[in-house]
Image: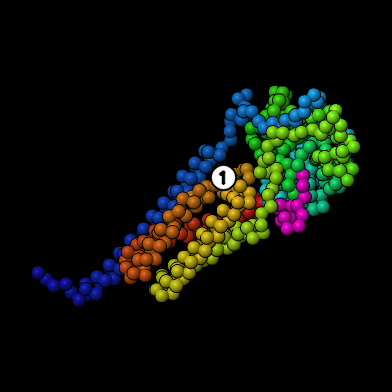
């Protein structure tokens, strides 16, 4: 049997190393492909699950929320809108008289809102587009007139493709706007003060839209964040159905139409004005929506999402740097960087859990919901769900990979790292993307 030549002996380790390198690259590529396929599958499921509800525009519409105002022996009547004078985004004054003669729909927002205003305005946009051929006006009133100037409202309206002939955006005196909301529409409006005043959360206001008839009387109310209620309103405006009893707006005949004196509370008239025959109306069965009232959350808790995004960004940079170091053969530096990346991810996990437990403690909800603002929500959910699925595996994969490296089992460590690295990197990158989409894009 001939002996192998010296040249063949010298080439054998190199060939083996090349084969291992090719195998490692192939494993990493396969892992990356699996991640991309997971994203594709999750995206398809999200699109199917969050697609338009075709039943919402049919006759089989479910019952909606009620505003029941109870008091034995009290006559319930429709409520006219008080006279007002506000400024439209064009700079022209708009009064109640200008809106008489055709029905109109009004909602309330402020342009810097970080909660449900984008979803509220999007619902109005979709309704206005669906009713573009109807003789109906749409009116959006800012609850933050000091910041929402006509120029700013013009920019805001352009984002939502608002037809200036059909959809008006109004601002004006804040006290008059608040009185209009409270005493004409009987809706929530509150301005936050002191430590509770955070940017994007300065006002707690209703997410209901009010339907006003051609005579200036409130004909109904609908929750803008409920697609089924907005579908009902669309059919009512088109004359295809009568307003359901659940959406009618009827109040006691003797309920005050204007604000009381400054020494009196709006809900509690002075004792001299009370009598057995005229007691203040009792509001019952009024659902308190998360969008209607915003709970004060401590400053430190509201800062955690940004801190978590920063930690994810740091982990991303450390992972990429660690990968370059090992490719350059700097094993000791690679080990230090990867251990730092792991420690960063552990700190992130601690802050992540602290944020969600804290949010549940203060608000009753463990997470911030993404508003329904079109396709961007589907993109967000696709990234979020794939992120969550892979994030569950990262602690186990990372710990196993680090253990093999510290134990000196280099071949097993390298093989394990080909799976761990792309998954860990994807989770870190998407963690930053999720923050940007949820707190910056949706918040803006």
At label 1, counting other C-alpha atoms closer than 10 Å, the crowd grade (few under 14, some 14-19, many 20 or more) is: many
Position of residue 221 measured from the top left corner of the image (x, y, whole percent): 73, 33
Q: Residue at x 65, y 36 (%)?
A: 226
Which residue reaches farthest left? Answer: 1
Establish if 299 lies above or below 363. Answer: below
Q: Nearer the viewer, residue 138 or 384?
A: 384
Establish if 423 lies above or below 46. Answer: below
Q: On the image, which quarter does residue 120 sit in?
A: top right
- Horizontal relation, residue 326 to residue 175: left or right: left
Residue 136 visible in the shown view: no
Is 193 magenta? The answer is yes
Secondary structure under the numbered disc 1 in the rendered image: helix
Per the image, the residue denoted by label 1 is: 378
Which residues lie in the magenta part?
189-202
Q: Residue at x 69, y 31 (%)?
A: 66
Residue 294 visible in the shown view: yes
Position of residue 172 measured from the top left corner of the image (x, y, whole percent): 85, 47
- Horizontal relation, residue 258 to residue 354: left or right: right
């Amino acid at each position: 049997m001939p002996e192998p030549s010296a040249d063949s002996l010298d080439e054998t380790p190199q060939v083996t190393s090349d084969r291992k390198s090719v195998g490692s690259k192939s494993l990493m590529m396969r892992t990356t492909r699996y991640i991309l396929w997971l994203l594709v599958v999750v995206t398809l499921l999200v699109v199917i699950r969050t697609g338009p509800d075709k039943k919402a525009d049919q006759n089989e519409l479910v019952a909606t929320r009620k505003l029941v105002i109870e008091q034995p022996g009290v006559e319930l009547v429709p409520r006219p809108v008080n006279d007002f004078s506000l400024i439209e985004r064009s700079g022209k004054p708009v009064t109640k008289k200008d809106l008489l003669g055709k029905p109109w729909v009004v909602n309330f927002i402020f342009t810097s809102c970080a909660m449900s205003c984008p979803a509220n305005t999007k619902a109005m946009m979709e309704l206005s587009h669906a009713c573009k051929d109807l003789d109906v006006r749409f009116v959006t009133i800012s609850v933050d007139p000091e910041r929402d100037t006509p120029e700013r409202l013009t920019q805001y309206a352009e984002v939502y493709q608002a037809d200036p002939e059909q959809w008006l955006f109004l601002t004006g005196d804040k006290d008059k706007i608040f009185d209009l909301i409270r005493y004409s529409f009987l809706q929530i409006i509150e301005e936050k003060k002191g430590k509770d005043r955070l940017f994007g959360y300065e006002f707690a206001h209703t997410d209901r839209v009010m339907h006003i008839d051609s005579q200036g009387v409130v004909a109904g109310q609908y929750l803008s964040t409920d697609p089924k209620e907005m579908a009902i309103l669309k059919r009512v405006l088109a004359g295809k159905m009568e307003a359901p009893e659940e959406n009618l707006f009827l109040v006691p005949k003797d309920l005050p139409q204007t604000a009381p004196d400054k020494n009196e509370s709006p809900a509690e008239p002075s004792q001299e004005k009370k009598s057995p025959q005229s007691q203040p109306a009792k509001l019952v069965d009024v659902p308190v929506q998360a969008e209607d009232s915003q709970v004060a959350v401590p400053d430190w808790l509201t800062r955690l999402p940004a801190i978590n995004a920063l930690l994810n960004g740091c982990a991303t940079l450390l992972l990429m740097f660690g990968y370059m170091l090992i490719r350059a053969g700097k094993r000791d530096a690679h080990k230090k960087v990867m251990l730092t990346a792991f420690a960063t991810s552990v700190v992130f996990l601690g802050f992540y859990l602290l944020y969600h437990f804290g949010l549940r403690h203060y608000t009753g909800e463990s997470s911030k919901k993404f508003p329904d603002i079109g396709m961007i929500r589907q993109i967000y959910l696709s990234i979020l769900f794939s992120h969550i699925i892979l994030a569950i595996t990262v602690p186990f994969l990372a710990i196993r990979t680090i253990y093999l490296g510290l134990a000196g089992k280099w071949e097993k460590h390298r093989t394990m790292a080909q799976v761990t690295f792309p998954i860990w990197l994807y989770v870190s990158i998407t963690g930053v993307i999720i923050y940007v989409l949820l707190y910056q894009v949706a918040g803006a």
